[in-house]
Image (tube, coloured by chain):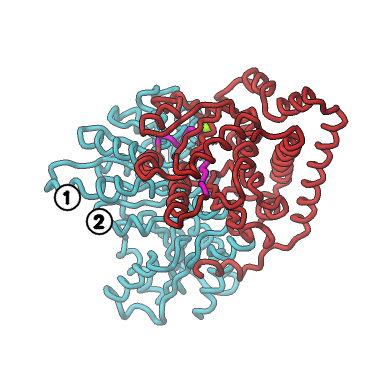
Amino acid sequence: MPLTPERLQDAYRQMLVIRKFEEAIRSLYQQGKIRGSFHPCVGQEATAVGGCWALRQDDYLTCTYRGHGQAIAKGLSVRAAMAEMLGKAAGCSKGKGGSMHFTDPSVGLLGANAIVAGGVPHAAGAALASRLQKKDNVAIAYFGEGAVNQGVFLESLNLAVIWKLPLILVCENNLYSEMSPSHETTSVVETYKRAEGFGFKAVQIDGNDVEAVYNTVETVAAKARAGGGPFYIEAMTYRLWGHMMGDPEIYRTKEEVAKAKENEPIVRCGKRLLELGCSDADLTRLDAEAEAVIADALEFAETSPAPPPADALTDVFI
Amino acid sequence: MPNITYVQALNEALREEMKVDPRIFLMGEDIGHHGGIFRVTKDLIDEFGVDRVRDTPISESSFVGLGIGAAMVGMRPVVELLFMDFALVAADQIVNQAAKLRYMSGGTVSIPMVVRAQQGGGRGNGAQHSQSFETWFAQVPGLIVVAPSTPADAKGLLKSSMRTGNPVIFIEHKLLYNTKGDVPEGDYSIPIGKAEIKRDGRDITIVSYSRTLLFALEAAETLAQKGIEAEVIDLRTIEPLDMPTILESIKGTGRLLVVHEAHNNCGLGAEIIARVYEQAPDSLIMPPRRLGAKHVPIPMAESLEDSVLPQTADIVNAVEAMF
Ligand SMILES: Cc1ncc(C[n+]2csc(CCOP(=O)(O)OP(=O)(O)O)c2C)c(N)n1
Ligand SMILES: [Mg+2]
């Protein structure tokens, strides 16, 4: 069932939470409070919310270092995510993981991954387990188009097809991998065609349209639950900020980014809501509600304690 | 002598060698117009063109493998891995292939390839971007492993690595890139397999390399104020190991501490101490010690990471406990 106008408002607010989360991180980063690297998903919120909201909480998710949005959309507590960014004991991984490793199995989030394509076989494995356990959960793996040249990615495609796994692969094609335009490094850059070559049912969709993403994932998830998997979705999107903080962005023009902003998911969803009868005041209210979620998470994370050094030695084994 | 950064020194080594040796070409992710995430290959594409400075897809096992193939037929590839952690994606090509092809062919083919990567922690990059793998590679016969700590050594050793004709794992450290040092002008190289005494001392020998070498020198300053004169040896090459320099030093000091950022378990400290006991059991006046990362993956939070990785204060404490 497509998102109702009410749910679409919720989705809009959720995308704003994700956007504001990344904006808050950027500002913390600029204050020197964030360690390591930070790969923002600004501009890609619709793939996260549309995809994860079309699933159940007990469906499995793996994602990448750029997966803050997916993790939050799947149900990761924004407080726990913010605390993890700041390396606090209350973080979703107790400060051990950091920006690239958000994990919360209680909402199906098996983990973000810092190795390109590293999480794809894990989602396939979770899908396999679902079959073996005679459950009807599906697994979804998000990855960038740069991942499609990795051996483990291509090997996983093959296994997913021959074992008919309840797996949904979502390629967020944002045109660049790091500082390289992906068409320069990838032979068939319309990645869904590669998946088709492996025997996947594959589509390419507008990844900045949250309703389109939602509808597609909902449809294929139902089929995958019934044994019709796997599926491949190439969601065309655009990363509005650099690959990571400090990216000089010499590989694209300001005009290109400005143009992409006209098509970005939150602006588009806002327009759509106005068409559906929302008022400007409604949008302002949704924005304020999202702002409050982030303010709360920031307050929580900034005031919570760092893990004591001795905690470094725990959690290696059961 | 020009005072330049570690990154500039590496860049100069690549440029100078590429100028004189047309067999050298570079492969790696974003090394071309972007000049590498850590800028080691900055501007080289302008001078040598896209044929010799090749941007690759994110497919480490294939481009390391292509490096091997090109090396077998007369080229001298220098392959950059963005993080040493990604060497594991290419581990088959490095360990099963590059390290063994010469031997298995009875010496009829050789693999003059350098695989460069930065490693190590200290920046909160998390467990998949902070590891130190020198011991893993040193364990594999057929690989040379170097890990310079200063700009001068970085330049000289990278040149030697490109000239040796053998597979070399060239280990840089992410937190050394911006450190500065004097680098001799003109062509020079540092021999592979030769350690250097970076500080003279009579009371204890501290053996280290890469970033912890700087910590060891810092610790030696503090110790000197407390009346302990530490001799600090920079291994520079991990494999082959320069045991003579170590043995000569402990003959004078009688005490040995090995410090590295890599995990202690089965680490280089264990290897060096074992060799000391095999080769000069009587030279030590007390049991040697080693200091490496605690046996956990490298955590992100500062409070955790600092406690897992050896710090200058840990070196001072370890040495003081030996007196
Ligand atoms: C095995 C491996 N190689 C290289 C990297 C470094 N790296 C991190 S992100 C990235 C680009 C990935 O691009 P893409 O898959 O398109 O995802 P995006 O960042 O655009 O979301 C690279 C090369 C890595 N993390 N893992
Ligand atoms: Mg991309």
- Confirm whether the magenta stretch covers residue A142: yes
Q: What's the distance in space between the residues labelled 1 and 2, CA to CA?
A: 10 Å
Give the image quarter of residue A303: bottom right
Mark 1, residue position: B103
Amino acid on which the number 2 mark rests in the picture? Pro
Which chain's residue wears label 1? B
Q: Residue at x 26, y 45 (%)?
A: B98
Report whether A11 appears left or right of A253. Answer: right
Q: Which residue is mark 2?
A: B141
Eyeballing the image, is B22 above or below A34? Answer: above
User: Where does residue B8 sit, x and y in percent of width and height?
Assistant: 49, 37
Chain in red in the render: A
Q: Position of residue B136 (x, y in %)?
A: 35, 58
Is residue A160 something that shows in the picture?
A: yes
Q: Which residues are magenta?
A: A137-149
Q: Is residue B2 visible?
A: no
Of residue B193 and residue A132, the one placed in the foreground of this image is A132
